[in-house]
Amino acid sequence: MRGLKLTARWPIRAVALLLLLVAGGAFIPRPLLVAAEASPEATASQRILLLSGPIHTDIAIPLDDRLRASFSFLEDAGIPVSDPAAQWLIFGWGGRSFYLETPTWADLKPMPVLRALTIDGSVMHVDVAGGISETHPAVTVLNVDGGRFEQLLGFINDSFIRENGAVVPVGDRGYGDYDRFFEARGYFNALFGCNTWTAAALRTGGLRMGFWNPLPQTLVLSLGLYN
């Protein structure tokens, strides 16, 4: 009986430990110390958006003429970056199987879930949008210093796999007419997945948040606490 009681306690302890790690990941900031304030000569800040779903986050970058030119390489894959109606360019990173095979919850299958819980390859998902309501509950408005904004763009660019200098589309697959998937660097699992990629990108952009954010909810919470 004693052995059965000890065995029964392990799942409870494991769940408690996981909850403790998630809470610590949100409330212990990274970087731990606040950086020195920017000098008056610092470049103007750039507004970006964090788009949050139940399990996934994306980063939306406002399109202007310069960024349309910078991301013109996406046009060949069917992303209408140059379309004047496109106001935002949206980036997300995630598990290859889950991303490609689960456009809606109704499409959920066991194998993509298993791969997400273990280890999987990764893809970048790129989309465009017209107007996005910045007051929507799923939208978080963030301001990034101009210099750090360039570093954020560099982080996103470096997440693509390139062959002969060109990004690599995953066939012609997308959820709609104007979004596409691309081969990406890194491996995905549930502990270090799409939201930790988003957090790393935002941290590159100079934003302060918890050191580990596997969930959209903890990411948004820690961004609000430390910015």
Image: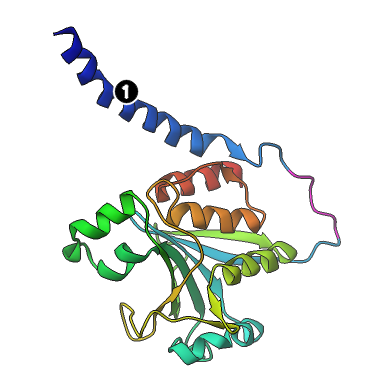
Amino acid on which disc 1 is placed: Arg
SS label for mark 1: helix
**Vertical placement of residue 227 versus 73, above or below:** above
> Crowding at label 1, few (<14), some or many (≥20) Cα neighbours within 10 Å?
few
Q: Residue at x 70, y 62 (%)?
A: 148
Q: Residue at x 32, y 54 (%)?
A: 116
* Residue at the spot of label 1: 13
Q: Which residues are the magenta region? A: 35-40
Q: Residue at x 42, y 56 (%)?
A: 188
Q: Quadrant of the N terminus?
A: top left
Instruction: Indicate the position of residue 129 as horizontal and vertical percent values.
Output: 44, 78
Name the foreground residue: 144 vs 194. Answer: 194
Q: Residue at x 72, y 66 (%)?
A: 146
Residue farthest along the left direction in this orientation: 1
**Side (left or right) of 205 relative to 180:** right
Query: Could you say which quadrant of the image residue 98 lies in?
Result: bottom left
**Side (left or right) of 119 relative to 147:** left
**Vertical placement of residue 9 versus 82, above or below:** above
Say whether residue 200 is magenta: no
